[in-house]
Image (tube, helix red, strand yellow):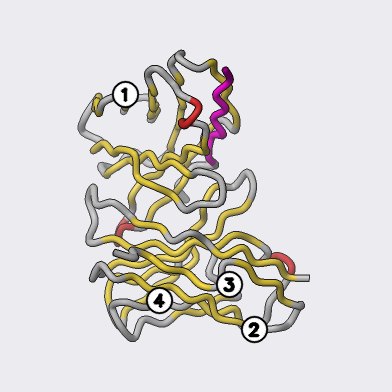
Amino acid sequence: NAGVTQTPKFQVLKTGQSMTLQCAQDMNHEYMSWYRQDPGMGLRLIHYSVGAGITDQGEVPNGYNVSRSTTEDFPLRLLSAAPSQTSVYFCASSYGTGGMEAFFGQGTRLTVV
Amino acid sequence: GEDVEQSLFLSVREGDSSVINCTYTDSSSTYLYWYKQEPGAGLQLLTYIFSNMDMKQDQRLTVLLNKKDKHLSLRIADTQTGDSAIYFCAREGGGNKLTFGTGTQLKVEL
């Protein structure tokens, strides 16, 4: 059982470039989220989805887009990369709410130069 | 918005108990979680507690919740070197959105 798979694991971008971070889960989970992790700041929610076709903004959505065309996939798009987006990005999925475990991917370490 | 705070570092000797603390600002009823992050990995759920409970025990882990002070703690008994990691508390909002604390780096020394 693969769980939550993120690709790539590492990426270096130049300022202004765009890219898509991929996230796929094989657990038929309805809820999926993207977080960024920065030193001393914990994880902050970027965007989340409660099911296919439904997305909403989290705490730090600026500069990122998402879509959810299937239950399995939840890609995160950086439209025009900035050095402030240098971070470790985590995708998570869960079956539901209320004591349900969120399963996390291994993370994507992104550096914007 | 919601604030969840943790101290950044904790160092203990192997075999001692570790206590990791967390405070939060929103007092509405919800689930509170403890996650563990090992180096280079994602987060793994350790345990959780609903906000109408005072305590939950799960093997070496004990979660204490003081609702009046909005204070959550995780006690790890007989701490081992394998427990060295970053520990995050998190509070669940609507749609399973999690608000995480800053994380506590636990270092276990021999």
Label 3: which secondary element:
loop
Q: Is residue B70 left or right of residue A112?
A: left
Label 2: which secondary element:
loop
The N terminus of chain A lies in quadrant: bottom left
How far apart are the alpha carbons under marks 3 and 1? 41 Å
Chain for disc number 2: A
Residue at 65% of width from left, 71% of height from top? A11
How far apart are the alpha carbons under marks 1 and 2? 46 Å
How far apart are the alpha carbons under marks 2 and 4? 17 Å
- Answer with the quarter of the image where residue A86 lies: bottom right
Residue B57 percent across, percent down from the top left: 24, 25
Vertical side of B3 occupied by B80: above or below: above
Residue annotated with mark 1: B60
Q: Amino acid at mark 4?
A: Phe
Total residue callouts: 4
Chain for disc number 3: A
**What secondary structure is the stretch in magenta mostly built from?**
strand
- Residue range in magenta is B103-110
Q: Amino acid at mark 2?
A: Ser
Chain for disc number 4: A
Residue A48: say if magenta. no
Residue annotated with mark 3: A62
Same-chain check, marks 1 and 4: no
Q: Nearer the viewer, mark 1 or mark 2?
A: 1
